[in-house]
Image (spheres, rainbow, N blue to C red):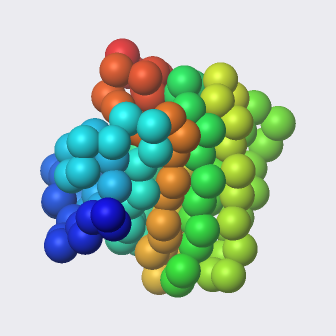
Amino acid sequence: MPRLIDCASRIPVPGGKLLDEYIGRVNSGQDGISVAHMRSPSGWSEPGQRPEFDEFTIVLKGTLRVEHEGGAMDVGAGQAVVAAKGEWVRYSTPTSDGAEYIAICIPAFSPETVHRDWE
């Protein structure tokens, strides 16, 4: 029988970013996939990371900057980006409108498998 996910779990993130997980380790007990709705303000950035998961990101509003070992790209509303596991990436929202996006991680995101630069 299908299972209704009644609401997301808000996961605390430093720097003013809002992260609402609908499917994943925290909200639904899934470890194979996570689906989260993100909203990050202008000027937000996070440390670089080299995760053990593939990340698929769909930008709904604004612009998400994705830095990688070969340079950087700006991903706008209606566009998507795929970051393969083991690839170094760093996400930020340098433009005045910030960004709203959906992030899907396979397997599910976890603090133990993201491998942020400062860890």
**Image x and y of residue 26, in percent:** 21, 44
Query: Residue at the location (43% across, 23% down)?
Result: 113
Q: Vertically, is 7 above or below 49?
A: below
Q: Vertically, is 28 above or below 100?
A: above
| Residue 18 seen in this snapshot | no
**Image x and y of residue 65, in percent:** 62, 59
Q: Vertically, is 106 above or below 7?
A: above
Query: Residue at the location (49% across, 70% down)?
Result: 101
Q: Vertically, is 5 above or below 9?
A: below
Query: Residue at the location (32% across, 64% down)?
Result: 1
Query: Residue at the location (47% across, 82% down)?
Result: 97
* Residue placed furthest toward the top: 119
**Image x and y of residue 36, in percent:** 38, 60
Instruction: Decide if residue 73 is on the left or right side of residue 52.
Output: right
Instruction: Decide if residue 67 is on the left or right side of residue 119.
Output: right
* Quadrant occupied by the C terminus: top left
| Residue 51 seen in this snapshot | yes
Instruction: Decide if residue 93 is on the left or right side of residue 68.
Output: left
